[in-house]
Amino acid sequence: MTTNARDGFTNKFGVIAAAAGSAVGLGNIWRFPYVTGENGGGAFLLVYLLFILLIGLPVMLSELLIGRRAQKNVFGAFKALAPDKPIFMSVGIMGVAAAFMILAFYAVVAGWTMEYTYLAIIDGLSGMNSTELSVFFQEFQTSKIGPLVWVGIFMFLTAAIVIGGVKNGIEKYTKILMPLLLVIIIILSIKSVSLEGAQAGLAFLFKPDFSKLSGEVILEALGQAFFSLSIGMGVIATYGSYIQKKENLMLTAVSVSFADSLIAVLAGVAIFPAVFAFGIDPSSGPGLVFETLPNVFNSMQGGYIFSVAFFVLLVIAALTSSVSLLEVVVAYFVEELKMTRKKATVIAAVSISVLGVFCVLSDDAFKFFDWTSSNLLLPLGGILIAVFVGWILGRQNMKDELTAHGGKAYFSGLLLIILKFIAPIAISAVFLHGLGLL
Ligand code: PHE
């Protein structure tokens, strides 16, 4: 890809696959289960799904239409669409900051996934019982050297794909592999549900206990919705700028949100029954998936093949997300700071790897980046994006963009109400309440 010609996606499935590739990743399979486990299960899931529908979907649609209307990276988009309102450019700046933070810890977890892929291939975890597997993960995670090397390898791969450009890089991989990941997760869920003692896990996930809800828990659910959908920071807007006018944005947003939520819930079904069946603590934190799933593989026929396939696909799912994160930074460097694509990618990838080192060395740095990006930066970006489309872009522009493919704009009245009032107020309220200020 040259510095000024914007390449695009080739067809509808390419767009949806790429956006879904960004959305579906460690957020669904690693972060969703561990955050759900820490926040009490069923009630959290319910609030999370409500936020996806009420806030996530409208914000995703807004991002798509901002990007496509402006044909620019997220920072440039707001500059072009509202040159006299610099406040909205902060979405671009916060977005680039969020991309740095998210990718820093994302690369660490992706690194764990790569280690587990390697272990799956050499069959290094079979025969261990549940306690041994937990101890193994903790020892690996605190060993530092292994995790550090993987961060470097993962960032190198991400950068290599980003340098390749959109069509050759992102789209080609996501189209085939995401559906395959879905199939594997469905098989894992079936196995997990049939384990002895699985019932308690299903009850944990699907029987809401509303006494578990607090301001903090609700804010976590909101942050998880934003993180999982890749919204609030310009990733989806950047992809929107690559989408052709003939594509239906509403259909894209609905399909991506649906696929993303489905995979998160299925990941929950694959993990929680096993958590309870193997006596693992659901609130054991970021290691939950890595301590749980190997038990399932060990207990199933063909576990070797499934474990290899699962971890390989998870690495790829992580890559299609990390590529989208790096793309935000690179598009910004290229279009605003006039760097070449290659130089921009190298500078971004190296500096993010350095932040990744901090996340490996310090749990506090890891948690800080994780919490601040999901629960603070993304929701704040979401408020500005909703307000921008609702109040500044306005009804007519919104409708034009929604009907550019030649079809109708369904629910545009409701959408406008959500973007103008409901989303900004709800996000602000959850936010202030979660921080104990309301
Ligand atoms: N949504 C991605 C995931 O679920 C992570 C991500 C967040 C990607 C924000 C881009 C932007 O893994």
Image (cartoon, rainbow, N blue to C red):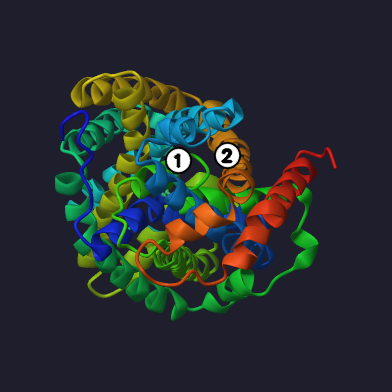
Please say if 299 is above or below 213: below
Viewer can see residue 32: no
Of residues 12 and 412, the one drawn nearer to the viewer in this rendering: 412
Of residues 411 and 28, the one drawn nearer to the viewer in this rendering: 411
Circle 2 SS class: helix
Label 2 – label 1 distance at C-alpha: 8 Å
Q: Which residue is mark 2?
A: 381
Q: Position of residue 264 (x, y in %)?
A: 47, 63
Q: Position of residue 184 (x, y in %)?
A: 30, 69
Number of residue marks: 2
Q: Is residue 65 left or right of residue 282?
A: left
Query: Mark number for residue 251?
Result: none
- Quadrant placement of the C terminus: top right
Q: Position of residue 260 (x, y in %)?
A: 43, 62
Residue displayed at 27% across by 64% down = 12
Residue 150, image quadrant:
top left
Residue displayed at 62% across by 51% down = 390
Bin the neighbour count of mark 2 within 10 Å (Cα to Cα): few under 14, some 14-19, many 20 and up. many
**Which amino acid does the dot numbered 2 rest on?**
Gly
Viewer can see residue 169: yes
Q: Which residue is mark 1?
A: 234
Q: Is residue 9 left or right of residue 69?
A: left
**Which amino acid does the dot numbered 1 rest on?**
Gly
Of residues 76 and 397, the one drawn nearer to the viewer in this rendering: 397
Residue displayed at 32% across by 68% down = 182
Of residues 380 and 348, the one drawn nearer to the viewer in this rendering: 380
User: Do labels 2 and 1 touch, CB within 8 Å?
Assistant: yes
Residue displayed at 19% across by 24% down = 342
- Quadrant placement of the N terminus: top left
Please say if 269 is above or below 105: below
